[in-house]
Image (cartoon, rainbow, N blue to C red):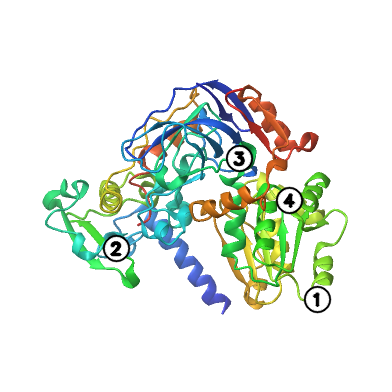
Amino acid sequence: MRAITWRGVNEIGVEDVPDPTILDPGDIVLEVGLSVTCGSDLHLMGGYIPAMRAGDVLGHEFMGTVAEVGPAVTRHRVGDRVVVVSFIGCGQCWYCRQGLWSLCDNGNPNPGMTEALWGQSIGGCFGYSHALGGYAGSHARYIRVPHADHGAFTIPDGVSDERALFASDAAPTGWTGADQAGVQAGDVVAVWGAGGVGQMAARKAMLMGAERVVVVDRLDNRLEQVRTHIGAETLDYEQVDVLAELREMTGGRGPDVCIEAVGMEAHGTGVQHVYDQVKQQLRLQSDRPTAVREAIHACRKGGTVFTLGVFGGLVDKFPLGAVMNKALTLRGAQQHGQRYVPEILDLMDSGEVRTEHLATHVMSLEQGPEGYRMFKEKEDGCVRAVFKPAG
Amino acid sequence: MATDTLTYLAGAVVGRVRSLVDPTGSASATAGRTAAGWLAVTVLRDPGDVDLASLPAPLAEFGHRIEVRADPAPAGKGTELRARLRDRRPPGPAPARLAGADPEADLRSALRRAKQLLEVGAVLTVDPVPHGRRTATPGGALLEAWTRGAAGAGVR
């Protein structure tokens, strides 16, 4: 089958790879309908997560039709239209039972790698390096889905493929951020990053009763999407002083909850951005925490800062003094999608969550390199490049 | 105060270097593992479900070469399952442990597989993973070696 692969730093290819097969009784093989680029792929593409091997199949956010089922699968049949959570959870360990699915003890066959980096390993993820299991990704005609009874969800008839696609990762990641940050009715919530995940975190915060939700970015078309499709307010950090604006908007308090949905390649302005770029390129820090720093400074005393963007290792000039002295709660997570997808699909069915606008560029697998280039450069207003393996 | 700090830092650095260079040194014998040498996982099963007389195959294969303990975990977290080699050779240096090339790597991997068997009923199969052309690069060779050892590597 054809698949989009990582060939080296900033080198994306399209090549023939073997078809996947059922390996465990709880597997399904899915014929991929749609598979979408994610901002976190850019960290792999750029070599910032150095656990990719040439030839690895990319992609972790996808939906499709069940083509084959293992003998232990009970919730799905051949022909079902399903969306699959990007993280693989066994459903039986303590973390899965707590609803903390991305922390699954049994989903990552290479636990030694992330144990060395972080002290404990987390779960596995499709198409996201050997550090997270080495699973083949979804930018291909077919993909094997282990523990399918837990990770695959039947899509309601009334939900289009283009909408359901984002119930795989962007929406449940946003849901994880707002829910785990403990947004309360009446809160003011600020979200850094107007990509798919940031938009979904803003939407969930609104659904949880936030009084005011403000999304920070620099890209006009994304900020316009936030205003039009999500209904939140926006700030362009290249045009205004974000900290001053947030203080003014909150009567001097600062937002109750600050959600960072940017990750390790954050942009910024001025000396700070240059400093972070130089240190990252010299490998003196692995991640650029520009947006996290701003979120910590912006947050009200006693508030919560949630890191939802993907980080891999170490950062420099981290404002720990502000965290401690302002009595902040600092949290983070990959997505616990199995916990949120049923609610998201219901809301997609009722029209309260809409995501089609994120799919700005729909392409064939053969256009993979072009799609990633456009996505990386934000060319032509690209918010997400979506691949349609059947052409 | 400054002198104390410098003395502490110097001691820490010397200890770390010594543990990497000479893992048999008495001062570094516990670097990366407990003095008693137990490796541990917590299994979400009642202690009564973890029968030490009938261990999961990955641990049973060690026979008398290992000691095994099972204790209740607090707050409903299941059972703490511990295993250690009877012949406890000095732990490998940190890089070997992280690469899964130390004397305890096989036991570490067996504990993880035993946990999966007790919780899920099977060990997740991974290979073969579909992939494209692998080019021969030093970085790729290093990653493949690390991946091969990753099931037994770690800090636990």
Q: Mark 4 lies on which chain?
A: A
Q: Which residue is drawn at 56% across and 36% down?
A: A59
Whether labels 2 and 3 belong to a single chain: the reply is: no
Q: Which element carries disc 2, helix, strand or loop?
A: helix
Residue A356 in picture, x, y percent from top left: 69, 41
Could you say whether the residue bearing mark 1 is in a helix, strand or loop? loop
- Between the residue at mark 3 and the residue at mark 4, the CA separation in whole angstroms equals 16 Å
The CA distance from mark 2 to mark 4 is 55 Å
Name of the residue lying farthest toward the bottom? B1
Q: Where is residue B13 in the image (x, y as percent from the top left)?
A: 47, 62
> Compared with residue A352, is residue A326 higher up or lower down, i.e. above or below?
below
Residue identified by numbered label 3: A41
What is the chain identity of the residue bearing mark 3?
Answer: A
Q: Name the residue under label 2.
A: B26
Dot 2 alpha-carbon crowd within 10 angstroms: few under 14, some 14 to 19, many 20 or more: few
Above or below, A3 relative to A158: above
Report the amino acid beneath label 2: Ser
Left or right, A91 with reference to A54: left
- Rounded to the nearest angstrom, the CA distance separating label 3 from label 1 is 37 Å
Q: What residue type is labelled 3?
A: Asp
On the question of residue A286 being in view, the answer is no
Q: Identify the residue shown where x is 50% and y is 67%.
A: B9
Quadrant into which the C terminus of chain A falls: top right
Is A212 positioned to the left or the right of A366 in the image? right
Residue A168 placement: quadrant? top right
Assign a secondary structure to mark 3: helix
> Residues under labels 2 and 3: Cα distance?
46 Å
Q: Which chain carries label 1?
A: A
Q: In this view, does B75 lie to the left or right of A184?
A: left
